[in-house]
Each structure stands twice: as C-alpha cells, then as structure tokens.
Image (spheres, helix red, strand yellow):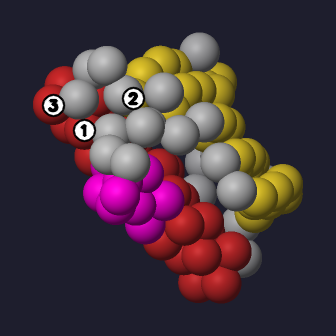
Amino acid sequence: MIRIVFFSENSLIKGFEAKGHALYSKKKDVLCAAVSALTTHTAKALNERFKNLKIYEQEKGYMKLEVFDIKDFLSQEMLKSLLDSLKDLEERFPKHISVEVK
C-alpha cells in the first residue's frame, strides 16, 4: 500500500511524505506510476519553477518534500491540487493507497 501523509500548519500545506508500493498489478503497476508522476511533477515544479523546496528526498518507493515558504500562493495551489488528485485515487483504490493530512 502507498501511504501519503501531508503535513499542514494553519490550513497551509508544508509538505508530504509518500512511502510504499500500491501492489495493484504484478506486471505493470499503473497506480504506482500515477502516484509517482503526480508527486514527481509537483516536486519538479516546486523546485525548478518556484524555487521553494526546503527538503526533497526521493528513492524507489519513497518521497519527502517540504517547502520553504508555506504562504507562497502558487506552491499552495500545487500542493492542494496534488492532495485532491491523490484523494481521488484513494477513493477509487482504497486497498492500495491511503492519504491523510496531519
């Protein structure tokens, strides 16, 4: 199962940590690929376009990031959009992905 925890402060998202594998399919795990594409896209945008990454760690089955400026509007929009997309996947595949906000 993929477990994703978003960290928030005063209703603003500070970052997230994603761990695990969906184990949706043995041949081609499209669910893992979808989560990877969404999280990697968000990380690249925050890092390269907005220069707003304080922490960025990535390895197979793991990603963690945290932004410098949680009040940056565009960074918040990117993180909220990611959260919404991952919540949609969680609704469709509850046995394979878990998303929470702390």
Q: Is residue 84 visible?
A: no
Q: Residue at x 70, y 56 (%)?
A: 60
Q: Residue at x 71, y 66 (%)?
A: 52
The residue range painted magenta reads: 27-37
Q: Residue at x 60, y 36 (%)?
A: 20
Q: Is residue 30 above or below residue 3?
A: below
Callout 2: 10 Å neighbours few (<14), some, many (20+)? many
At mark 2, the secondary structure is strand
- Of mark 2 and mark 1, the one earlier in the sequence is 1
- Of mark 3 and mark 2, the one earlier in the sequence is 3
User: Which one is in front, 30 or 90?
Assistant: 30
Q: Tell me where residue 66 appears, x and y as whole percent.
A: 74, 48
Label 1 – label 3 distance at C-alpha: 5 Å
Give the amino acid at mark 2: Ile
Q: Which residue is mark 2?
A: 97
Horizontal side of residue 93 vs 69, given as left or right: left
Give the amino acid at mark 3: Arg
CB within 8 Å, label 1 to label 3: yes
In the rendered structure, find residue 92 and report the number of the disc placed on it.
3
At mark 3, the secondary structure is helix
Label 3 – label 2 distance at C-alpha: 9 Å
Q: Tell me where residue 67 appears, x and y as whole percent.
A: 72, 53
- Magenta highlight on residue 50: no
Q: Which residue is mark 1?
A: 89
